[in-house]
Image (spheres, rainbow, N blue to C red):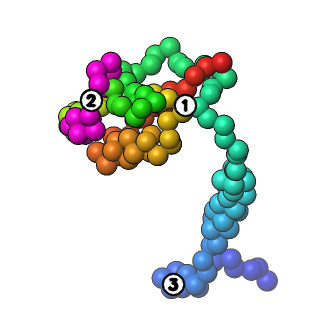
């Protein structure tokens, strides 16, 4: 007697779900999380602002220099500005559809809060291209 390998009712609903692709996806995500989790847990003791090697690319973008001296005075390029004028200059820069990089240069003896205040002013205006310059030894 021969066996028949066809379904009796072809129009009936399929009651089985193929879970093989779901298991493959779960294992792929598990591997990704296992690899990336150790990279997230980094605590590094910092000693800034001295840099030991200069690693700047040759095709550097257009940038605007913002300096803060030891007394806490602001300089836009080489021109001294007040905090209010600095805010106006940042507002003008924020209106540009492609703003340039803001290169922040601060004296090593300057309190850290002064730099954070400037970075906060920049972030409030939704400018995201910031470079913190350091001294190269």
Nearer-N-terminus badge (2/3)? 3
Q: Quarter of the image holding residue 79?
A: top left
To which residue does mark 1 refer? 108
Say which of marks 2 and 3 sits in front.
2
Q: Between 6 and 15, which is closer to the camera in this rendering?
A: 15
**Quarter of the image where the N terminus is located:** bottom right
Say which of marks 1 and 3 sits in front.
1
Dot 2 crowding, Cα within 10 Å, few <14, some 14–19, many 20+: some
Dot 1 crowding, Cα within 10 Å, few <14, some 14–19, many 20+: some
Mark 3 secondary-structure assignment = loop
Q: Quarter of the image holding residue 9?
A: bottom right
Q: Which residues are magenta?
A: 76-88
**Up-down: is 42 above or below 8?**
above
Q: How far from the left and from the top, in percent, is residue 105?
A: 45, 28
Q: Is residue 4 left or right of residue 124?
A: right
Residue 101 visible to the viewer: no
Q: Between 40 and 22, which is closer to the camera in this rendering?
A: 40
Q: Between 44 and 18, which is closer to the camera in this rendering?
A: 44
To which residue does mark 2 refer? 81
Alpha carbon of mark 1 to alpha carbon of mark 3: how far? 73 Å
Is mark 1 in CB contact (under 8 Å) with mark 3? Answer: no
**Quarter of the image where the C terminus is located:** top right
Mark 2 secondary-structure assignment = strand
Nearer-N-terminus badge (2/1)? 2
Q: How far from the left and from the top, in percent, is residue 116?
A: 44, 45
Q: Tell me which residue sits at (68%, 77%) in the image.
A: 5
Alpha carbon of mark 2 to alpha carbon of mark 1: how far? 20 Å
Q: Tell me which residue sits at (26%, 34%) in the image.
A: 82
To which residue does mark 3 refer? 13
**Up-down: is 39 above or below 54?**
below
Dot 3 crowding, Cα within 10 Å, few <14, some 14–19, many 20+: few
Is mark 2 in CB contact (under 8 Å) with mark 3? Answer: no
């Amino acid at each position: 007697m021969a066996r028949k390998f066809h379904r009796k009712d072809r129009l009936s609903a399929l009651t089985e779900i193929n879970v093989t692709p779901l298991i493959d996806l779960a294992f792929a995500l598990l591997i990704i999380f296992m690899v990336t989790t150790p990279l997230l847990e980094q605590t590094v003791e910092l000693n800034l602002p001295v840099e030991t090697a200069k690693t700047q690319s040759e095709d550097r973008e257009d940038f605007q220099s913002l300096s803060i001296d030891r007394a806490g005075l602001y300089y836009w390029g080489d021109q001294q500005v007040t905090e209010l004028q600095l805010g106006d200059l940042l507002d003008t820069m924020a209106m540009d559809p492609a703003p340039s990089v803001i290169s922040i240069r601060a004296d090593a003896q300057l309190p850290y809060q002064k730099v954070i205040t400037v970075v906060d002013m920049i972030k409030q205006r939704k400018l995201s291209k910031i470079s913190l310059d350091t001294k190269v030894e």
